[in-house]
Image (cartoon, rainbow, N blue to C red):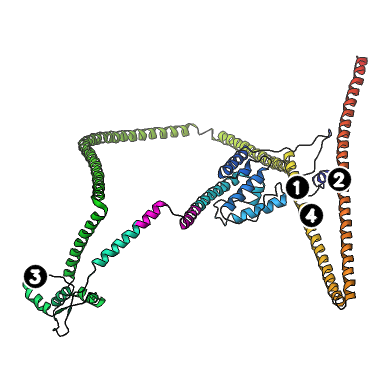
Amino acid sequence: MAAAASVFHRVRTGSKLGAQYDQEGNLIQVESREDEEQSVKLAETLELLLAAGYFRARIRGLTPFDKVVGGMTWCITTCNFDIDVDLLFQENSTIGQKIALTEKIVSVLPKMKCPHRLEPHQIQGLDFIHIFPVIQWLVKRAIETREEMGDYVRAYSISQFQKTHSLPEDEEFLQRKDKAVRAVLDVMEVYRPQRKYRRQKDAGELLDEESQVHATLLEYGRCVCVCGVGMRIETLMTSMAAMAKGEGKLTVSAVGQIVGMQSEEIKQMASEYAEKHSELTSEERSERFGPLQQHRRAVASLNKQIQQKTEELGELQAKHAELSVICDEAKNKLMEVTGLHSHFYLKVLEKLRALVTTSENLKQQEQEFRSHCREEMLRLQQNIEDLKSTSGPDTEELRERNALIDKQYNTDKDKLQKIRLLMARRNREIAILQRKIDDVPSRAELTQYQKRFIELYSQVSSTHKETKQFFTLYNTLDDKKVYLEKEVSTQVSSLNVAMSSSAAKEQFLRQMEQIVEGIKQSRNKMERKKQENKMRRDQLNDEYLELLDKQRLYFKTVKDFKEECRRNEMLLSKPRAKGAS
């Protein structure tokens, strides 16, 4: 019971564990084991957080729990995930707050698709072997997110800059672009097809497809002359009439008829048009940019072609060298294989001859061994017969002797069985005693149990205090609500009466002033009471410190008294020893 009382002694809520002192008045330090691997993982975790940019891990005043949890929260928020945590003003929290905080962090990790599993008690217990992989993955994810956001912000800033500002190169490019567009439009306007003639209405219809194509081309001024069709062209030209400049545009239906008539001739005309157009554009470019620019472009294109051909030549030479090496290796292997083939057959033939000789020798040895075994068997059988014939009269003595031997054997066998049963019983008793000894906890286990029970009691007491505060707050707010409802109803009823006349209105205002004055007085009383309680608390704290000093002095006095008693006993024992001697 004394041990239970020492374990479950009441401590102040919201503070550290109650201090324990020895007989000398010194603070008892609880034995704790530090795992070297855990320390190494803690150092690696803090270095990883510092490398990622979480510099609060350098603060020596923070505990490892605050550093690790702060780093995890920082990484999660950097990855654009929400977590309901405020670490700026809640350091060195209680066990309940730590557990709630770790549960919030662990609940966010599956949303981030973290491949590593982590439990709240592992964070609260500072199990860095399991925490380190999660921290490593979070830091990697945070760095990737920052790079993505950096690229996005950089692109957004560039786009915003380009909306309001422009570089000289951009302005020059826009000017050249406008000039080039205008030049292309002018060329298209100049070289677009225009109708020069129109077929007369009273002319006869053209029945064959070839005549229709030629007639349409002649309307646009195209002269496609073949030796055998000169007369037909003149006939068609007679049915043509000159057109005004505004009527020479090509319609969609006419283009459709042309495409449907003769596709081969149209392709040939299109190729001729493309050649003419390229010649004209080259002439215009030469006139526009000058021979120097044209020469530079030609030199650049030739250099590019030379470089490409050089690269192709190098690749072909490399392939040729590789193929020649492979061909030489194949020839060498072929020669080796042909040489080994003949040599291999000779070796196989020699081995076969040796094996045949060995087989014949083994067969001969087997026959000799069998004959020898038969002779030995006959000799042994003859010996057995001789022994049976010579040992006939002594059979009775042998039987008695065998019976005694069997009896002694059975007796010894029973003794051995009894000894085994006794040994098994002793082993069971030893195992039971060993289990009982193992059930008794050691000093280190008792210390661990005591520490865990104290932590559990602290957690329960803090939860109880929070629940009590919630109940008190609820009751206070409920009473406040009732009083406010009564006050509102009273004020509404009195307001209606007070607003009926000016005298009642003045009386109502005076009553309100009196109520306000009473509230101020009550507030002052509560402030004075609060100050008195604070002074009382400080006084009790001073008394507690004085009592602690007295306790230390008492332990020290008891120790000195014991030391003096021991010295007194030693001094008294010396004369007695001398008298006895």
Q: Is residue 207 magenta?
A: no
For mark 4, what is the residue? 465
Q: Which of marks 4 and 1 is nearer the N terminus?
A: 1
Mark 4 vs mark 2: give the one in front.
Answer: 2
Q: Which amino acid, by three-letter code, is at mark 4?
A: Lys
Name the image quarter holding residue 187.
Answer: bottom left
**Which residue is the site of mark 2?**
538
**From the viewer's perspective, is the residue at label 2 or at label 3 nearer?**
3
Mark 2: few/some/many CA within 10 Å (<14, 14-19, 20+)? few
Q: Taking 307 as reference, is 196 above or below it?
A: below
Name the residue rendered at 32%, 59% in the picture.
179
Bounds of the magenta span?
151-175
Can residue 45 be seen in this snapshot?
Answer: yes
Q: Which mark is residue 453?
A: 1
Number of the front mark, 1 or 3: 3
For the residues labelled 2 and 3, the Cα–Cα distance comes to 124 Å
Task: Tell me the CA gap for discs 1 and 3.
Answer: 115 Å
Give the main secondary structure, helix, strand or loop, of the magenta stretch.
Answer: helix
